[in-house]
Image (cartoon, coloured by chain):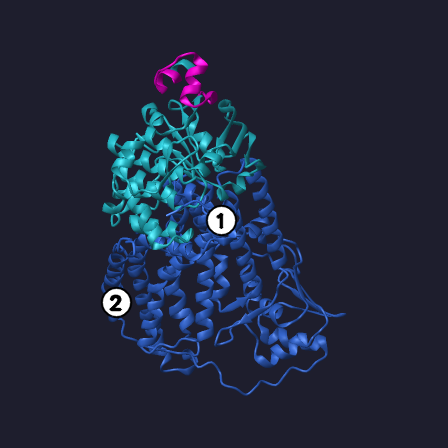
């Protein structure tokens, strides 16, 4: 054996990626964090699924008697969102510990000093670690995915677009938490500190939701920074291109920051300067994503859209529509108007701008205004005022402003709803016994040692 | 001594240099190891091939005025030295002298306040040090939940080592008994051997090793010394940070005496003795005289 080679032949571009990826995957699998999380998730998701199916079944009992009631029964709202809601809690509270391990373990053992000397660029190392985080998320989602299989097995209905959209939203959320954890591990000396930093982001988002959501002014803007906003659109059955790009930009931003802080041989001043640069770049990218308006309603019942004929007609209205709302942001009527009319108009019409007449004043300060509650719609040069929050009143008014006739209702199949009274005891057995046993078995198999290396004769 | 080698191993590939000294070629060194024969350091001087002798005259790495300060405490002050190709250079100093900091600074994994490193006369920025230098830190047990085999396979895969090359490295360092053990369950000595094996699997011409003999008994230290010697004969260069002076004296060609972050003396043991005006004396005596 002759070890000496010219250093020029070992440029970083030459290193194979496979050993690095295999190493990262083995590191994830060899840690207790992932398996412990999986075992904890089983009963959590199992109980949520059990409860969701129970409540859905109770509602379905009446729905089976009445088609009108049945049409309001959607598995997305009734089963999928609650079941994946517990997965979201687990990802928020437990997944950071799994993701931090991808880098934290190497930092604590000193192996990072070996890793950074290997012939890989720093971004390659971070990308490999992010790939390991992705793999960990996929494994963590097995209990939630098994709930989908179980729902299907008991005769439940799944709409592929809305199910995949929800899964994609959770994937993005998991990657976002993972990227934050990676960044935290790269700036922290210990895994414990990294966990605190990551939980400050994830649990801090809950604090934002509970304390400042629905508040006017700056607080409302701060509330929008909450990580829980990531999932909201997906849970509503919306695929928002702008949101997806924004989450992607944020994941990239945290990964870039982790990349800045990973190499130990760089001066602190340089790291800070590069970090500020990446924060600004990410902020700019996030600003640009607000201009991406393309959104798809992937729900089977089209709850986020007007009827198809109205959608087509509204899309053809080329002049700008300005909506001036005389409501405080925290007023429930504003939320109702926003959900049932304004958000749909923004998605359907090419040029819509919405503004609050009194800026972001609070409800108390606007109470004395006679015009409070009015919403003014201006299309081109014509305008009209309404206090309604129902599209049945507002759409005809808009067509009148645009000088077009309201479209005839299209003949088509209405959303039937999917009532189901399903047996659910088997779910408890699976999530509390079967699946944990499978996970324990997989854990045991993952701990098996490989055959030693032996020279070929 | 030449006769003794000829008598014991007449079939080993050797030749004589112009001065009439017996030269063991690298292949011969491997044969010695495969026969489990420990070679005295003084004997090994004769095993240097002519190519390696020539290489030793070349400055492989030049460290110039490296300075490192933590807050208001100077850890390294204007440290400068050369590393010759194919030599084993010992950085000698007590705990806290700055040996580890110096190795990390040279390896490029610790930012420095001042100074530079040149590779064969050309500047080598810290971002490119890993192309030429590999540093084996002290006290690291990498990937503790993995088996020794998996850790070695990872490095072998990264550097595209064949199974035979990997197996040979394992045999040289005596890791075979613990291949199926997890890293966290290794003794201190086997952890060292693992790190050394990882170092051997790298292709770098210059290996920096922090306290490579810590945790070894006398016999084990002798084995590792022989191994490093054999690698040096093949042209690889070593810089070892050692606080045990007896071990350092056994293995190193030249010494850097470091105390309080400053270089107090550089040279072969004889040169250092000459500088302080003594004809004999151990490295310990020399170090005490310099510091």
| Mark 2 Cα-neighbour bin, 10 Å: few <14, some 14–19, many ≥20 | many
- Determine the residue positioned at 25% across, 50% down: B180
Q: Nearer the viewer, residue B135 or A157?
A: B135
Identify the chain of the residue marked 2, using the numbered disc in the image. Answer: A
Q: Would residue A214 be seen by someone viewing this image from the given angle?
A: no
Q: Is residue B264 magenta?
A: yes
Residue A31 picture location, percent across and down:
32, 51
Q: Which quadrant holds residue A111?
A: top left
Report the side of A215 relative to B16 (left or right).
right
Q: Is residue A402 above or below residue A224?
A: below
Single out the mark in the foreground, 2 or 1. Answer: 1
Q: Earlier in the sequence, mark 2 or mark 1?
A: 1
- Determine the residue positioned at 53% across, 58% down: A248
Q: Colour of chain A?
A: blue
User: From which residue to which does the magenta span run?
Assistant: B259-287
Report the side of A242 relative to B18 (left or right).
right
Give the farthest residue toward the right. Answer: A381
Q: Which quadrant holds residue A114?
A: top left
Identify the chain of the residue marked 1, using the numbered disc in the image. Answer: A
Q: Nearer the viewer, residue A164 or A50?
A: A164
- Which residue carries the number 2 mark? A430
- Which residue carries the number 1 mark? A10
Q: Would residue A220 be seen by someone viewing this image from the given angle?
A: yes
Chain letter of the cyan region: B
């Amino acid at each position: 054996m002759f070890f000496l080679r010219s250093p020029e032949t070992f440029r970083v571009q030459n290193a194979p990626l496979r050993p690095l990826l295999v190493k990262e995957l083995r590191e994830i699998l060899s840690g207790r964090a992932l398996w412990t999380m999986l075992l904890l998730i089983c009963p959590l998701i199992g109980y949520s699924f059990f409860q969701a199916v129970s409540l859905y079944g109770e509602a379905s009992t009446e729905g089976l008697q009445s088609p009108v009631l049945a049409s309001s029964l959607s598995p997305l709202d009734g089963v999928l969102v609650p079941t994946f809601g517990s997965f979201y809690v687990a990802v928020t509270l437990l997944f950071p510990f799994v993701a931090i391990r991808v880098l934290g373990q190497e930092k604590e053992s000193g192996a990072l000093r070996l890793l950074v000397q290997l012939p890989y660029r720093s971004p390659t190392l971070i990308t490999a670690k992010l790939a390991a985080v992705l793999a960990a998320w996929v494994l963590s989602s097995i209990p939630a995915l098994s709930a989908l299989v179980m729902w299907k097995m008991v005769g439940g209905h799944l709409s592929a677009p809305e199910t995949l959209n929800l899964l994609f939203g959770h994937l993005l959320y998991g990657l976002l938490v993972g990227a934050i954890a990676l960044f935290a591990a790269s700036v922290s000396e210990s895994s414990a500190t990294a966990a605190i930093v990551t939980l400050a982001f994830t649990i801090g988002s809950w604090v934002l939701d509970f304390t400042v959501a629905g508040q006017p002014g700056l607080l409302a803007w701060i509330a929008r920074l909450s990580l829980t906003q990531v999932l909201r659109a997906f849970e509503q059955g919306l695929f928002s291109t702008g949101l997806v790009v924004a989450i992607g930009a944020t994941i990239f931003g945290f990964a870039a920051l982790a990349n800045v802080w990973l190499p130990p041989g760089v001066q602190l001043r340089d790291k800070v300067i590069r970090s500020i640069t990446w924060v600004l770049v990410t902020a700019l990218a996030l600003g640009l994503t607000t201009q991406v308006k393309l959104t798809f309603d992937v729900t089977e019942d089209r709850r986020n859209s007007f009827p198809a004929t109205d959608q087509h007609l509204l899309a053809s209205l080329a002049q700008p529509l300005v909506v001036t709302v005389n409501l405080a942001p925290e007023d429930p009527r504003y939320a109702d108007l926003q959900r049932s009319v304004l958000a749909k108009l923004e998605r359907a019409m090419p040029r819509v701008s919405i503004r609050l007449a009194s800026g972001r004043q609070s409800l108390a300060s606007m109470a004395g205004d006679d015009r409070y509650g009015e919403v003014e719609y201006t299309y081109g040069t014509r305008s009209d005022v309404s206090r309604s929050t129902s599209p049945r009143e507002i759409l005809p008014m808009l067509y009148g402003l645009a000088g077009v006739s309201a479209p005839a209702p299209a003949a088509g199949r209405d959303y039937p709803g999917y009532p189901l009274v399903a047996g659910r005891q088997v779910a408890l057995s699976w999530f509390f016994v079967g699946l944990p046993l499978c996970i324990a078995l997989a854990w045991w198999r993952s701990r098996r040692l490989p055959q030693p290396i032996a020279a070929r004769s | 001594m030449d006769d003794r080698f000829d008598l014991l191993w007449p079939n080993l590939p050797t030749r004589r240099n112009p001065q009439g000294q017996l030269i063991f070629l690298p292949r011969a060194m491997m044969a010695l190891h495969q026969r489990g024969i420990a070679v005295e350091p003084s004997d090994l001087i004769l095993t240097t091939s002519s190519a390696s002798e020539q290489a030793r005259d070349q400055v492989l790495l030049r460290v110039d005025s490296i300075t490192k300060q933590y807050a208001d405490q100077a850890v390294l002050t204007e440290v400068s030295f050369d590393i010759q190709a194919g030599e084993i250079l010992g950085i000698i100093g007590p705990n806290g002298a700055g040996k580890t900091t110096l190795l990390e600074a040279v390896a490029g994994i610790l930012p420095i306040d001042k100074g530079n490193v040149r590779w064969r006369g050309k500047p080598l920025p810290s971002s490119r040090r890993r192309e030429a230098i590999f540093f084996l830190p002290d006290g690291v047990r990498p990937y503790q939940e993995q088996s020794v085999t998996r850790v070695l396979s990872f490095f072998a895969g990264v550097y595209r080592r064949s199974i035979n090359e990997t197996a040979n490295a394992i045999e040289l360092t005596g890791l075979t008994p613990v291949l199926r053990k997890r890293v966290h369950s290794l003794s201190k000595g086997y952890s060292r051997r693992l790190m050394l094996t990882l170092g051997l699997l790298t292709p770098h011409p210059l290996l920096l090793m922090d306290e490579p003999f810590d945790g070894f008994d006398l016999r084990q230290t002798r084995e590792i010394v022989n191994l490093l010697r054999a690698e040096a004969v093949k042209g690889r260069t070593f810089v070892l940070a050692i606080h045990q002076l007896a071990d350092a004296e056994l293995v190193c060609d030249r010494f850097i005496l470091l105390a309080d972050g400053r270089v107090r003396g550089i040279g072969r043991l004889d040169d250092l003795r000459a500088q302080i005006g003594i004809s004999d004396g151990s490295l310990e005596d020399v170090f005490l005289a310099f510091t």
